[in-house]
Amino acid sequence: MKKLILFIFFFGISATGFGQLKSHSFEEIDSLQQIQKRKIIVFIHTDWCQFCQRMKTTTFKDKEIMDKLNSDFYFIDFNAEEKRDIIFHKQTFKYLPSGNNVGVHELALQLGTTNNQIVYPVLCVLNEKNEIIFQYSSYLSPKDFQFLLEKLLKSK
């Protein structure tokens, strides 16, 4: 009986890493690209955005999407209100306060602005050279996101 309990306990610990979306940091991307070239998908969101939270609980919890993102892309989950400095592509980006405990990160503006505004959530796709090749500002259902991933994989 003790062996069975120990087996279940250790199996449970080792199985918790499976089925999760692997999110990378901007700082990791350059070294990852040297190992294997992949497109980068940046999910730019805020804590207060309802559609952002909905994508986190639906789209990014879909097993097929997680598998495809983990195997074929580098995924970055990026809070647009992140306060730490971020070094990406040999440039330092900073948080820009705009009021009392309110602001936006320079990198979120750089990657997420279209038509002189940023509307959350934003999906920004970068090629292997860190150049923006696609931006989309709105909620994407799992089905629509799956379609987008297929198109991105076919385009070289």
Image (tube, grey):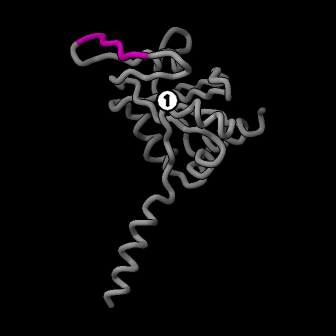
Instruction: Name the residue at 40% across, 18% down.
Output: 105
Query: For the magenta stretch, what is the residue range?
Result: 93-99
Give the x, y percent position of residue 100: 21, 14
Instruction: Name the residue at 34% across, 82% down.
Output: 5
Give the x, y percent position of residue 72: 66, 44
Residue 46's place in the image compared with 92, above or below, is: below
Query: How many C-alpha atoms fall within 10 Å of the one at disc 1: few (<14), some, or many (≥20)?
Result: few
Q: Quadrant of the C terminus?
A: top right
Q: Quadrant of the N terminus?
A: bottom left
Instruction: Name the residue at 43% across, 15% down.
Output: 106
Residue 139's place in the image compared with 8, above or below, is: above
Q: Is residue 40 left or right of residue 154?
A: left
Specify the amino acid type for callout 1.
Glu
In the image, is residue 85 part of the stretch drawn in magenta?
no
In depth, the one of 137 and 155 nearer the eye is 155
In depth, the one of 79 and 118 nearer the eye is 79
Give the x, y percent position of residue 10: 39, 72
Q: Would you say the magenta stretch is mainly helix, strand or loop?
A: strand
Residue 75's place in the image compared with 130, above or below, is: below
> Which residue is labeled 1 in the image?
27
Quadrant housing residue 8: bottom left
Badge 1 element: helix
